[in-house]
Amino acid sequence: MIKKTRVIFGVLMFLAFSAVSFGQGATTSSMAGKVTDNRGQALPGATVVAVHVPSGTVYGASANAEGFFLIQGMRPGGPYKVEVSFVGYTKKTYTDITLFLGETFDLNASLTESSQELTEVVVVGDKPSAFNSLKTGVSMNIRSQDISSLPSISRSINDFIRLSPLYGGSNSFAGRDGRYNNIVIDGSNFNNNFGLSSRNMPGGDAEPVSLDAIEEIQVNVAPFDVRQANFTGAGINAITRKGTNEYSASVYTYYRDQSFNGTKVGDFELPPAAKTSTKIIGARVGGPIIKDKLFFFINGEYESSSVPGMEWKAYRPGVNNLGDPNVSRVPADSLIKFSNFLKSKFGYETGPFEDYGTFAVENYKILGRLDWNISQRHKLSIRFNTVRNTNDQLLNATSAPNPRASSSRVGVNAMSFKNSNYGFLNTVYSLSAELNSNLSSALSNQILGTVTLIQDTRTSPSEIFPFIDIWDGSGDAYMSAGYELFTFNNNVVNNVYTIVDNVTYKTGRHNITSGISFEYLYFGNSYMRYGTSYYRFKDLQSFVNHVNGVPGYQPTAFAITYIRPQ
């Protein structure tokens, strides 16, 4: 099956009474306010210059006829130094200002005539709070300091979005299913559209971007901005780190195994835990290429995890007993005969039926970013990242054409072979480019283009061979072998292309924003496109009779050939 979807969003226009800056998900911050004299009269033409101190990035604006100013497309974070000046008045400087992602810092300046006061006025420690940031709806921000200091077991964004008071578990906000959320990193969509894993982002069991590369996360539940209204759950926006005028680097490693788990519930001692391990090693580096002008940031991370592959044992009289923990009712000699028969008759290798070793999860992530201060008016950012993840999986439990078995293919009632298991190969490639321009004191523009290529491919250790279920004669699964039924040529492709252009014009105390958004979504699934076969037999002897062509035996009473159409 191949499915292709194309979506085009048209022109948006609305009147806002606060200055906000969003694109396809928030990527920047803003600053707005009013400049007056000490009598409260507006000072048209007053100059506002904001400098992001770590990078030397400069932003500027002039107050309009009513004294209002607006600066859009600013780097989140800080600290910022802001100077407000007007001819004949004493300059006022604000320091240690920090901007939150997707919010507008409210800065109102009152200047005094220079004849009355000759020295510069410096205001220190004016950090944002709920009272001096113009909120864009029910939202909260998690900054890099929070990400670094708060505990995280999975090292996932999901460990931090639950800090929102509206979080209800399972990535749900305000009672809405978590699959309604819209997840955006640097303007790129990172939604798990096909739902192949429990995570709400692509990449299988791997996070598409290392947590060490995330600078800030915003959870926006009820945005006022129409440009954020293309979802019905929560808007989860994240931005990645950027380089500054100082070189900085970090190398880190994490390790966790079963010994980190508790061993008691009250006074009750738990059974020994299965052996597991998770190892992570990563590094990041950032700094200037040209001071105050061009910056770079690079992050790389490798993760390796292992869990028990399959702990069930076949029944061996005199060695173990039916009813013992992890002992299946299927005799080992029956499994050996089944495997040998497939080998001698068809040359098919089933692999072992127990002691698989461990199931592995391995992934690596790479992210690179460039930020270019073209001029005081124009700022360009480009980010590329990729993740590659592999993940071993146990054979599907019961899925098959009806009627299905009433028990799992692996467990107390049934056993299968290693080569009937499968795995996932998940890859993500994402590119984002954003240009923020303050064209004049009244006019600003943001253009954002993204490409995200997502592919989830099933893998198998088996050679091409029909999948065979042997039942026990009463409808319960007993033995299974062959190429996993839903794996052959199972390849999901999900590509998203977006272009967003937002223009904001300030007139008086109002902001008029118009925008054009284009999104192209390609979704394809070549699942079993070329066909596969499935055979079911009531017992092992029926299968042998069918293969050997026993006279008088009617295989059609017990065998089903299932070919998935293209």
Image: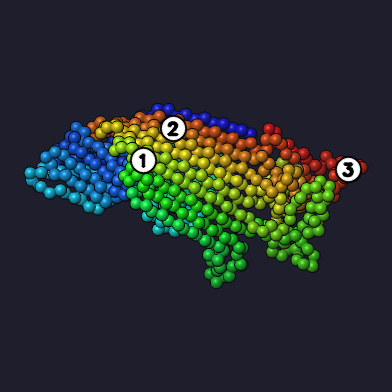
Residue 184 in view, yes or no: no
Residue 475 as seen in the image, left or right of residue 226:
right
Residue 40 as seen in the image, left or right of residue 546:
left
Nearer-the-camera pick, 100 or 264: 100
Q: Are marks 1 and 2 in contact (CB under 8 Å)?
A: no
| Crowd band around label 2 with a 10 angstrom C-alpha radius: few (<14), some (14–19), many (20+) | some
Residue 105 as seen in the image, left or right of residue 170:
left
CA distance for labels 3 and 2:
63 Å
CA distance for labels 1 and 2:
20 Å
**Image spot of residue 507 (x, y percent):** 25, 31
What's under tag 3, amino acid-wise?
Gly
Q: Name the residue rendered at 84%, 47% in the picture.
A: 345
Tell me the tag on residue 161: none
Q: Quadrant of residue 493?
A: top right
Q: Which residue is mark 2?
A: 499
What's under tag 2, amino acid-wise?
Ile
What's under tag 1, amino acid-wise?
Trp
Q: Name the residue rendered at 57%, 70% in the picture.
A: 268
Tell me the tag on residue 372: 1
**Image spot of residue 394 (x, y percent):** 66, 52
Q: Which residue is mark 3?
A: 549
